Amino acid sequence: QLQLVESGGGLVQPGGSLRLSCAASAITLDYYAIAWFRQAPGKEREGVSYISRSSGSTNYADSVKGRFTISRDNAKNTVYLQMNSLKPEDTAIYYCAASPWNYSGSYHPFEYDYWGQGTQVTVSS
């Protein structure tokens, strides 16, 4: 049963913006901590941002701080990642993940039970 689906990726010029979406079925995302990860070819998967359940507190990797914003829309059962001032080094496949027991969120992939299939982001001139 498909539970998380990412969308919104594509090709954008340096300095441009994209908004990624993580839509859920069968689960209610406001009961989970949600994280965004990314992986470029030949590189390790890295954490980008996470948002806690209930409180809505957030965290960002140093490489994206001040440029990316994570948010929830409970009515649409969707989590977003707004990406501004994009750089070529942001090019990667972006994944969302949901944790049923880590209330605050983390960048440890093993703590997340549910994953989407990923969406490609390419930043190039």
Image (spheres, rainbow, N blue to C red):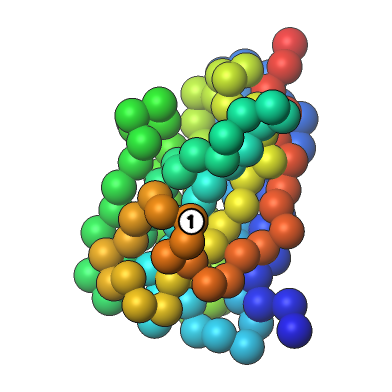
Residue 59 relative to residue 109: left or right: left
Quadrant of image for the N terminus: bottom right
Where residue 77 sits, quadrant-wise, is bottom right
| Image x and y of residue 125, in percent | 73, 11
Residue at the spot x=56%, y=40% of the render? Answer: 45
Residue 77 relative to residue 104: left or right: right
Q: Is residue 87 above or below residue 113?
A: above
Give the total of numbered labels: 1
Q: Is residue 46 above or below residue 76?
A: above
- Other residues around mark 1 within 10 Å, as few (<14) / some (14–19) / many (≥20): some
Which structural element holds mark 1?
helix
Where residue 121 sits, quadrant-wise, is top right
User: Is residue 30 visible to the viewer in this orientation of the structure?
Assistant: no
Residue at the spot x=58%, y=27% of the render? Answer: 90
- Residue type at numbered disc 1: Pro
Q: Is residue 34 above or below residue 28?
A: above
Question: 38 and 82: which one is in front?
Answer: 38
User: Residue reaching furthest bottom?
Assistant: 26
Residue 15 relative to residue 108: left or right: right
| Image x and y of residue 107, in percent | 39, 50
User: Is residue 38 visible to the viewer in this orientation of the structure?
Assistant: yes
| Image x and y of residue 108, in percent | 41, 54
Q: Is residue 23 above or below residue 109?
A: below
Question: 71 and 27: which one is in front?
Answer: 27
Residue at the spot x=61%, y=75% of the render? Answer: 24
Residue at the spot x=63%, y=45% of the render? Answer: 94
Where residue 21 sits, quadrant-wise, is bottom right
* Residue hosting label 1: 109
User: Residue reaching furthest top?
Assistant: 125
